[in-house]
Image (cartoon, rainbow, N blue to C red):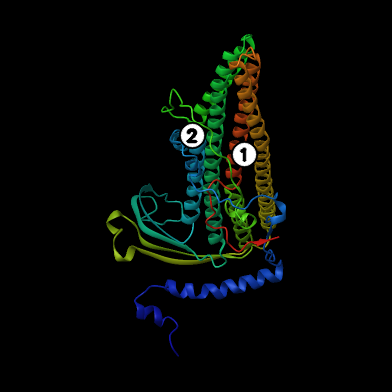
Amino acid sequence: MNNPNSNYSQAGQDGPSPSRYVGALRPLALAAVLTLSACAGLPPADPAPRLATPAAGDFVKAPVAGQWPVNQWWSDFHDEQLNSLIEQALHNSPSMAVAQARIGQANAQAQLAGANTGARLDASADLTRQHYTANSIYPPPIGGSTLNSGDLGLNFSYDFDFWGRNRSMIESALGQVAAAQAESAGAASTLSAAVASTYYQWQLVNARLALQDDVQSQRNDAALPRQTRVQLETQRDELYYQLKSLVGGTQFPEHLAAKPLPNADVGVPTNLPLDLVARRADVAASRDRIKAALHDVDASRAAFYPDINLSAIAGFSAFGLGNVLKTASRNIGVTPALSLPIFDAGRLRAGLDSSRADVTMAIAQYDQAVQSAVSDVNDAFVQLQGAQREQASLTQQIAARKRDLESAERRQHAGLSDGREATRDKLALLTLDDQELAREQRAVSARIALIKALGGGYQDPAADDGLSKK
């Protein structure tokens, strides 16, 4: 009969090799799982979540000639002054610094989760000088003497993660990183839209001030125009400092140049219902948080299974420093370990229920984000359509008033009128021009709001991930 210890002697080892323990771990784990299943029952797998998705009927009827916003959509306004302000804002704004800090936090958590998996190797060394009592476990010559002792060693450990708990925790952390990145993109979209909207409100007030100069030149009772001008100047200054606060930094221009308001004609993309959830940063962030929460559920479920790991030590330990590195002072050991949860007063079940509740919350937040996205698109386009519908009426009124003014001026030149009729027509025309400026600004603001509602140029890189939809 073969000697059961012959393998050790042939290999020149003092005990079982680590590979023998590793080979025995999986059957041991299987036996533990069967035992656990018989005792308490493992939690069943959760069904795939069902997420809301917008349909074509959810949106207002709108022209479909529009395109999705590009990443730097503001460049389509062809205003270098606006381009510079938005670029400064994205670089200097505290809100962007906060968003970037959140990404850093999420990355650090992901790195920490990854560092807690796989193999670990530590080196240790210590030196002790100790007087050993003669009335304890050590007999003479150790007992009753003062000796030096030393230890040198390497400590190895490995968690096999058969059930994927560590992997799920890493995937959850990576999902939080993706969510933080999407939220940063959303913050950039919100900031750029706010800068553009405030900028064009400032341009509107500046244009209305120019009109007031003409109004004041036409009126004898100049008190009312002066009061209106003071109000507009106050509004202009308020908008200037609001814009300066949004942009941040020290490079904000002392004076802004007056620019005409841009064209606001725009439609919606033909694939709006299909792609909206992939082009909104807030929706993408909510989706990433669902995926992170699902991985947390997987990690919580894996905690019901036994934890299996292997640890080993190799080094030297001896009394007397001169003996530490001698062959006889070798200290070698291999320890496979299994931790089997049997009774924990409901902690594992409570942890799983908490993770499932997080998934439910994340799904509700996702559905809410989708609903808000549809509402934002509809609100912006209704406002844009309203401003566009006003244009035809105002254009007709302006044209009619211009004809009246031309007729009044001809009568004045012919000596048939004293000029008051022409002045009245000029003031009426200036009032209509002011209304048209306000209409143009409302249209531009609605266009900017629509750009933001359509995602502001963002596109989720992980939109098609297999999550179910309602």
Q: Is residue 345 visible?
A: no
Q: Nearer the viewer, residue 98 or 38?
A: 98
Which residue type carries mark 2? Ser
**Residue drawn at (51%, 66%) of the image:** 160
Task: Say if 362 sits above or below 416 in the image.
Answer: below
Residue 415 in picture, x, y percent from top left? 61, 13
| Residue at the spot of label 1 | 446
Task: Sort mark 1 into few (<14), some (14-19) or many (20+) by Cα contacts within 10 Å.
Answer: many
Q: Is residue 36 visible?
A: yes
Q: CA distance from mark 1 to mark 2?
A: 24 Å
Secondary structure at numbered mark 2: loop
Which residue type carries mark 1? Ala
Residue 372 in picture, x, y percent from top left? 67, 46
Q: How many marks?
A: 2
Q: Which numbered circle lies on residue 93?
A: 2
- Most extreme residue toward the left is 322
Quarter occupied by residue 29 = bottom right
Residue 276 in picture, x, y percent from top left? 61, 53
Task: Say if 193 sits above or below 283 in the image.
Answer: above
**Residue drawn at (43%, 23%) of the image:** 254
The mark nearer the N terminus, 1 or 2, is 2
Looking at the image, residue 458 sits to the left or right of residue 19; the answer is: right
Looking at the image, residue 320 sits to the left or right of residue 115; the answer is: left
Q: Nearer the viewer, mark 1 or mark 2?
A: 1
Task: Say if 15 sits above or below 68 in the image.
Answer: below
- The quadrant of the rendering that contains the N terminus is bottom left
Quarter occupied by residue 297 = bottom right
